[in-house]
Image (cartoon, rainbow, N blue to C red):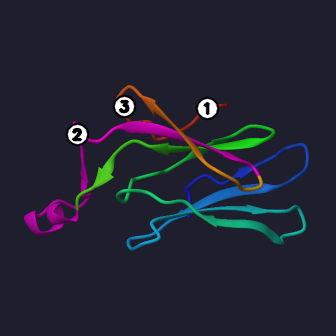
Amino acid sequence: MTAHPNIDPQIGELMTFRADWKKPWLRYGVTDSEGTQSVDVEIELPFLSMMHDMAITATHSILLDLVAYDFSMLSRGYRMPLRWRDDLEARLGVIPRHGGKIRWFEVAPCFTQHVVNA
């Protein structure tokens, strides 16, 4: 699960994402202030992306799809299998808070681990 789940300070909803080592690689979820999960949707990704944080607005959540895992690095002795690839686009995914079609926006190649605000 995301290292930094986000709580809406107005209504108490909790927004999260869950990344996995196997498909589906990414799920997005919302839990209401009573602890009941109201949204649990799969988000299709072309590869497993290292996502650490996300941003929220009053109506949307923003996912950061910026850098890929490369598991072949583990057999070469690397402990963290993250690899920059110039051939992969960096993008932000904007999804309606309560589920729906995610829209992807290409951004300049970068890596952001923590989000300040949205």
What x and y, as percent, mark residue 50? 40, 53
Location of mark 2 (residue): 87
Horizontally, is 108 left or right of 8 in the view?
Answer: left
Residue 80, picture quadrant: bottom left
What x and y, as percent, mark residue 1? 56, 64
Residue type at mark 2?
A: Asp
For the magenta stretch, what is the residue range? Answer: 71-97
Location of mark 3 (residue): 110
Q: Which mark is residue 116?
A: 1
Q: CA distance from mark 2 to mark 1?
A: 27 Å
What x and y, as percent, mark residue 110? 36, 31
Whichever of callouts 3 and 2 sits on the residue coming sooner in the sequence is 2
Q: CA distance from mark 3 to mark 2?
A: 13 Å
Which residue is pictured at 61% across the width and 32% down the height? Answer: 116
What x and y, as percent, mark residue 78? 17, 59
Residue type at mark 1?
A: Val
Residue type at mark 3?
A: Cys
Which residue is pictured at 22% across the width and 42% down the height? Answer: 85
Whichever of callouts 2 and 1 sits on the residue coming sooner in the sequence is 2
Q: CA distance from mark 3 to mark 1?
A: 16 Å
